[in-house]
Amino acid sequence: MSIAHNLKTVLDRISFAASHAGREPSSVRLVVVTKTVDIDRIREAVAAGGLLLGENRVQEAKEKIEKLGSIASWHLIGRLQTNKAKYAVKLFDLIHSVDNIELARELDKQAAKTGKVQDVLIEVSIAGEAAKAGVALSAAADLVREAAKLKNIRIKGLMTMPPYSDEPEASRPYFRKLSELRDRLEQESIPNVSLKELSMGMSGDYEVAIAEGATLVRVGTAIFGERH
Ligand SMILES: *Cc1c(COP(=O)(O)O)cnc(C)c1O
């Protein structure tokens, strides 16, 4: 199937899942995940209506953005090393993967230098797998409160990636915990923090994520096919 066809199918399924959950379809946005995808296929996806593009490596994104320019809004969804914060601030409208205070401080510093306020999400590791990206659930609230003090970054919400499973329903408890964390933090009304965005759900489980409140779903394989 063509990229345009696949993209339309995903957008239709997003709308359906949102309506089914009693939500406005426009409250869920698709991040088209373009990691490992070549320039021509990215162009096709944008032409077919992809508005947000997600990359997981700074260097790969930089090369693509230099070629494609601002044809869409670029998001960083993968792990960010502190020493690459400088580039990330130049390249991305939203960074989904802030999971420690040193990184938040460096992004703040680099954003200040360029006169930008960098939008970020706090990535939470609900399962608490040590090797995986994301701040532990138990430490997430403290990270949000600390990072909220930085004036050149703005926290827009939370992100998570459940452990891999073939079964979409296996992700539901993780999505629900992220949503509950968001609700708890919202009650604190922390200044400089808006927790509107929940970035959760990938090709295998985005409909479950939407049922649990996702506002950004990150989908690659269902649009471009398997990565090699
Ligand atoms: C690759 C990736 C995705 C997309 O995964 P698919 O299963 O191909 O849809 C989503 N989020 C992150 C963080 C990724 O690295």
Image (spheres, rainbow, N blue to C red):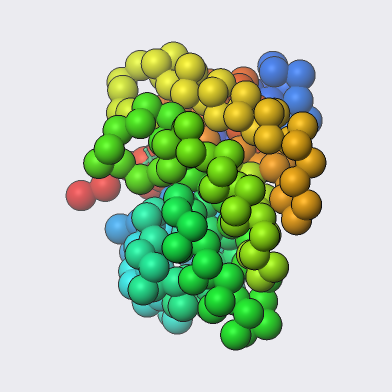
Give the side of residue 42 with respect to residue 213, left or right: left
**Total tally of numbered discs in the picture:** 0
Residue 2 visible somewhere in the drawing: no
Residue 190 visible somewhere in the drawing: yes
Point 43% across, 21% down: residue: 171
| Placement of the N terminus among the 4 image quadrants | top left
The quarter of the image that holds ligand 1 is top left
Q: Nearer the viewer, residue 171 or 203?
A: 171
Q: Residue 83: name its quadrant.
A: bottom left
Give the side of residue 60 with respect to residue 89, left or right: left
**Residue furthest out toward the bottom:** 113
Point 45% across, 77% down: residue: 87
Point 39% across, 68% down: residue: 82
Residue 84 position, x and y percent, is 38, 73
Above or below: residue 49 compared with residue 113: above
Residue 38 position, x and y percent, is 34, 64
Q: Nearer the viewer, residue 18 or 90?
A: 90
Point 60% across, 47% down: residue: 144
Residue 49 position, x and y percent, is 61, 53
Above or below: residue 138 compared with residue 52: above
Residue 199 position, x and y percent, is 56, 41
Above or below: residue 42 compared with residue 31: below
**Residue furthest out toward the left:** 228
